[in-house]
Image (tube, rainbow, N blue to C red):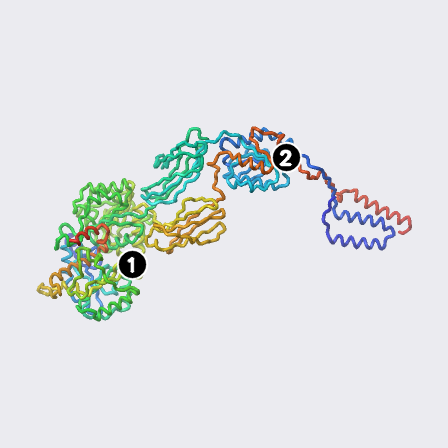
Amino acid sequence: MSFSSVDFTSILIFSAVLILTLIYSKFRLLRISVLVIILFILFQPTFVLLEKKGKPNLAILIDNSKSMIFNQRLEKAKKFYRENLQLIQKYFEADFYQFSDKYTLIRKSDLAQVKADGNSTDILNTLNEIGANDKYDAIFIFSDGIDSFSQDIRKLKLKKPVITVCPKEEPIKDISIVEIKTSDFAFKNVPSEVTIVFYSIGFEGKEVNIYIKKGKEIVLSKKKILDGSYQEISFEITSAKVGTETYTAEIEPLLGETVTTNNRKNFAIETIREKIRILYICGQPSPEYYFLRYFLKSNPSIELVSFVILRNPEDIAVVPEEKLSLIPFPAREIFLKDLFDYDILILENFNYSRFYLTQDYLANVERFVREKGGGFLMIAGDNAFGKGAYFGTAIEKILPVIMDNPDEPFEEGLFTPVVVNKNHPLSFPDKDIYPLDGCQHLRPKPNTNVIAVHPTLKLEQKNAVVLACMEYGKGRTVALGTNTTWKWLLSPAYEGKSDLIYKNFWENIIYWLSSAERTKSLRISMLQKIYAVGDEIKIKIILLDDKLRNQKPVLRVVDPYSRIKKIENLTKTTDGWFATYIPEIEGKYTFRANISNLEDQKIISVENKILNEEFDLKINENLLRQIAVSTGGLFFFSDEFSIDEIIKTVKKKEIPVVSKQIQIYLSPGIYFLILFMLILEWTLRRIKGLI
Amino acid sequence: MFRIFFIFFLVFSISGYGSQRDRFVFTQLQYDGLWDPYPEIYSEILNFLDFTTSIVSLPERRVVKATDKELFSFHFVIMLHGGRFNGFSQKEREMLRSFLNAGGILFIDDSSGIVNNDFDKKIRREFEIILPGKEFTKLPIEHALYKSFYLLRNVAGRNLNKNYLEEIKIDGRTAVIYSQNDIFGAWAKDKFGNYFYECSPGDEEQRFEAQKLTLNLIVFSLTGTYKTDVIHRPFIEQKLKR
């Protein structure tokens, strides 16, 4: 019998009525009986019939993590349940769950639709959580035992028997790439280490070929003897091309290997320049040369080699050669030997014919742009373009402008260039800029990018080109029709304005010509993007600007709870600083380094355990056996299933269950009883003449 | 007719303001004082420059005041001192500061021939105001100025008052060069074409050294530290050993 709570006000009213009734009534017994019954009804009495349980309850689990794909394990699990479930349910009540790192209650009919799509498996935690439900007498689990998280059996708190089942398989033979450790960027032409971590089983003592591929082309290869465990192999990749390139690490499949899809893994490395190498040749000393050379020299990401012709063959020497600082112009070395070591060639006001440079030299410049992807810039002057006798040469082919013969005039006078292509990276703001002085007569070639033109000088009805560019072969070229951009440094100073236009103008040209993004002076580098809790994270802070290298950066980490912590263990290295950090919880970590207004950050992910679903494919029979033993359960292979053993192991728990419930307060009989007793009491009082 | 007009236009444009292009311009600073002790020497210097180097120059002198907007049209300005200097005005100081900070170069040559004179004190005080926190330091003999064209082993000038030049650097760049040896005085001639001053104590050899130093100064103003680049070092060191 059970009772519900009752309203306190009702009890007060009822008590008052009871007291008054007892005071004024002669047939107290009847009335008291009626009132007691009413009081009884107020508590909403319910009759509950309990009986002992019939069948023990089982939670039936099916592993749906990715490792169940291999060897058709999931299909074997489904087949097992299809064949044995009827028998199991004859003796047990069953609920069904699918699980990987999470678990979900499913219907029996859904078992056939379960897909192996779980990224990781957490067997022990799943058993702890489902087993906490008192309803279940035991847990029945079909799994391959591959657990991505803790495999410490002491973490299993369950006191119910667990019946573990796994498919019986021939020993797995597999080689799989677990992880690729590499910095996400490397310097151009500087070797960068790439380490492949791989796992093998079943091929102990065998030798495999391991490749680094770019597309289908094998870039590097090594051999390694397999030892049936986790191994590492390192390569040094050197890229001559700036930009991000995707590589593939591949271990050549061996005969009889169970799965070959895990033998390859892609990774990307961004190649940046340590320095943009520029060769700058100028035909005569000029303010343009003075300022541009200083500007290029001041940029830490540029390595400049420059030559300026100080004396022409016709100039008089008033002292012996040894009293002059002049050196012979190394034309052959520059144009035929060393040119391909540079990224950009600048010719300013330079007439090649005065220095007996043959057409072969110029053809090599064309090859430098077309084949090597070099940048070429010609700057105006009395010895440039047509006036420099480049008409009809290989240089004419690579320039984005049409030039005339050496007799073409040079436009004198101040002018303010007009920008006609405002969307190109070489574009510059032409509003309120300061005039330049003198402009070459240049016309645009078809299909080239004209960036700026002379406001008034017309050549064949088109404004003369001041700045134009084009892509040629693998490289890029720019033609600049003036050599007085230095005016943009000095002229704004008169009005107290900044020299930004000059700096931006030249930076844009240099970076566009070198096909490089602006190199960041500060970078954080870590080998991996995913770490495990407790791993030591090695952090490199690379400083590309020599001026910054003696300054100590500030390194902070933001942990998954958004707590900011300063990392103090910085030590100096040749190219910057080094620090370590050990994460204690899983989640995202952001590392930020600051130095002199510069900042770089990297985000990494820390996980409880690195996922092993795709490389560690061997059935973990040992874990499943341990689970069974520690919980007093059973372990067997799917083809050795015995219901009798399970029945013996799983005992019925003596918990009474409700078989029937009668809500007395809703029964009409009790109200008839009250009515009867009231009528009886009234009748007796009538007989006695009390009413 | 068109040709005559074109030639006229060309001559006009070369001699007129705003047509210097990339040519070297002999620009001299005018200030309150005796700023122009040698008004004719520029043509001698430019002739020498044209004959011996690849530098193309305007065949004339430009004179600018520190307060002129035109100061910012020239990157190299020469300040000669003829014996009286009344200091710069506040506006002149501000303009010179802007000019030097923007990349301009100022060469100061004391033509008075007197050591530690009033000009020396005044010009140092001026630059304490113009470029606060910076001061004149000795220009080492390894400086690019001494090898920008001629290989020079010593300082020269009409007088040898100091065996060094001085400089003020801005962001690692030599922005102000100061001589107390009257380098430009070595060029001065009378109306008969004879040198106006004797050079002491080295006489004509010293004059030639002063003239070479003048040329180096101009080449330096157009090439900067070019001659200290790695590629030149072995050649220059070898020549200096001879």
Is A295 drawn above or below residue A402 in the view shown? below
Residue in the foreground of this view, choosing between A391 and A138: A138
Position of the N terminus of chain A, as image quadrant, is: top right
On the picture, is A171 further left or further right than A309?
A: right
Residue A317 placement (x, y as % from top left): 13, 53
Chain that bears disc 2? A
Is A155 drawn above or below residue B72 in the view shown? above
Is A205 drawn above or below residue A186 in the view shown? above
Label 1 neighbourhood size at 10 Å, few (<14), some (14-19), many (20+)? few
Q: Is residue A384 visible?
A: yes
Chain that bears disc 1? B
On the picture, is A672 further left or further right than B194?
A: right
Q: Is residue B19 visible?
A: no
Please state which amino acid type lies under the numbered disc 1.
Asp
Displayed quadrant of residue A568: bottom left
On the picture, is A665 further left or further right than A77?
A: right
What is the distance, in whole Å, between disc 2 and disc 1 at their CAs? 86 Å
Count every numbered label the image shows and give the total.
2
Q: Residue at x 81, y 46 (%)?
A: A674
Say what secondary structure mark 2 lies in. loop
Q: Any mark on residue B171, and which?
A: 1
Say what secondary structure mark 1 lies in. loop
Q: Which residue is mark 2?
A: A650
Do callouts 2 and 1 point to residues on the same chain? no
Label 2 neighbourhood size at 10 Å, few (<14), some (14-19), many (20+)? many
